[in-house]
Image (cartoon, rainbow, N blue to C red):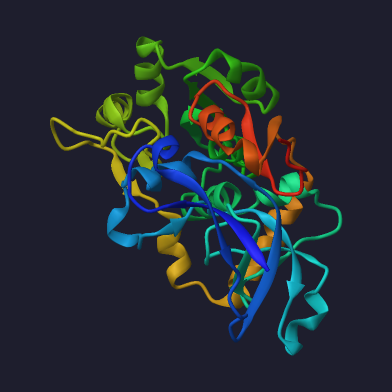
Amino acid sequence: MRRHALTYRAFGRPLETLNMETADVPRLGEGKLRVRMLCAPVNPSDLIPISGAYSHRIKLPAVAGYEGVGRVIEAPRQYASLIGKRVLPLRGEGTWQTVLDCDAALAVPVPDTISDAVAARAYINPLAALTMLKTWPVEGKRVLLSGAGSNCADYLGAWAYQHGAREVVGIYRSESRVARLEQLGIKPISIHNMPKISRMARESDVVFDALGGRVAANILQLMAPGATFIAYGLLTGQAIQLDSKPCARYRRFHLRDSLASMSGETWQHKFSAIWRLLDQSAMPDYQVFSRQEWRQAVEMALSPSGPKVLLDFTLPLHD
């Protein structure tokens, strides 16, 4: 059996460093499932590591992609019941490939009620959003989101209301995101409207920041004592640089930190909650590309105004 994998052997711009490579599939290891991938999203969180932002923890060469959904085609005897079933093959090999092997204990079975497109995006952003809302409760509070319109910010905003938030305001970078934010009940503010952003920074109890850079620094400096600023993303590619110590509490969130100590039982339990939430959530529109069209997919994902992107490994290839 052969597999095709979007691989990078050096850090740099994704369109310059990624290549589709073909190799033989090795013998299945002990405790592993072999999964034929159905589809995988192209997220900023997939592309940023390729640039070298986290080079200290990535061993090259590496297959890109952190999440997706596939169907089990081979399994050890104790997991034979999963053959033919859909799973999320997570926390192992990169998901932008046609066939991969994953730890059977960490593979997440997908309910029949969940579509492939929803399942493929059920890990990074939903789990991060749910974990942050559990860690920093928002009941009765005014919440400000930067990078509004991104997948994670969408979940944070919609689910913040379910967790009792009084108001949710979102800072967007592209006008194309406004209708979606309003649909979710998130009050939109343009990233160019600095007077309004400054006012909301002073009035907000909790800020979830996906941007970093100058806007995030300005918000943090203006927040009141007792408020909390959570930095969880770096969509601008720029760190937060402050002129003085902020009055608000500053916290950083990396999903991988919370996963390090998470038991297999807790891991599976988290997804039980996520499936229920996703079943009730309005998902954003997305554009589908075949693996042959991966360059167009990455290019679209790099655009702040573009739709969400999905690589479909089942689509037929064309000449």
Q: Is residue 89 above or below residue 51?
A: below
In x, y percent, where is residue 169? Answer: 52, 25
Q: Is residue 139 above or below residue 264?
A: above
Between 280 and 175, the residue placed more toward the observer is 175
Quarter location, residue 186: top right
Q: Furthest residue to the right?
A: 112
Residue at position x 40%, y 25% in the image = 203
In x, y percent, where is residue 253? Answer: 39, 51
Between 78 and 196, the residue placed more toward the observer is 78
Residue at position x 46%, y 50% in the image = 136
Q: Is residue 244 above or below residue 51?
A: above
Residue at position x 55%, y 47% in the image = 129
Q: Quadrant of the C terminus?
A: top right
In x, y percent, where is residue 317? Answer: 73, 41
State left or right for residue 85 relative to residue 150. right
Q: Is residue 206 visible?
A: no
In x, y percent, where is residue 63? Answer: 49, 56
Label total for image: 0
Q: Is residue 116 visible?
A: yes
Quarter location, residue 282: top right
State left or right for residue 122 relative to residue 248. right
Q: Is residue 277 above or below residue 77?
A: above
Q: Furthest residue to the left?
A: 243
Q: Quadrant of the N terminus?
A: bottom right
Residue at position x 36%, y 60% in the image = 60
State left or right for residue 316 relative to residue 223. right
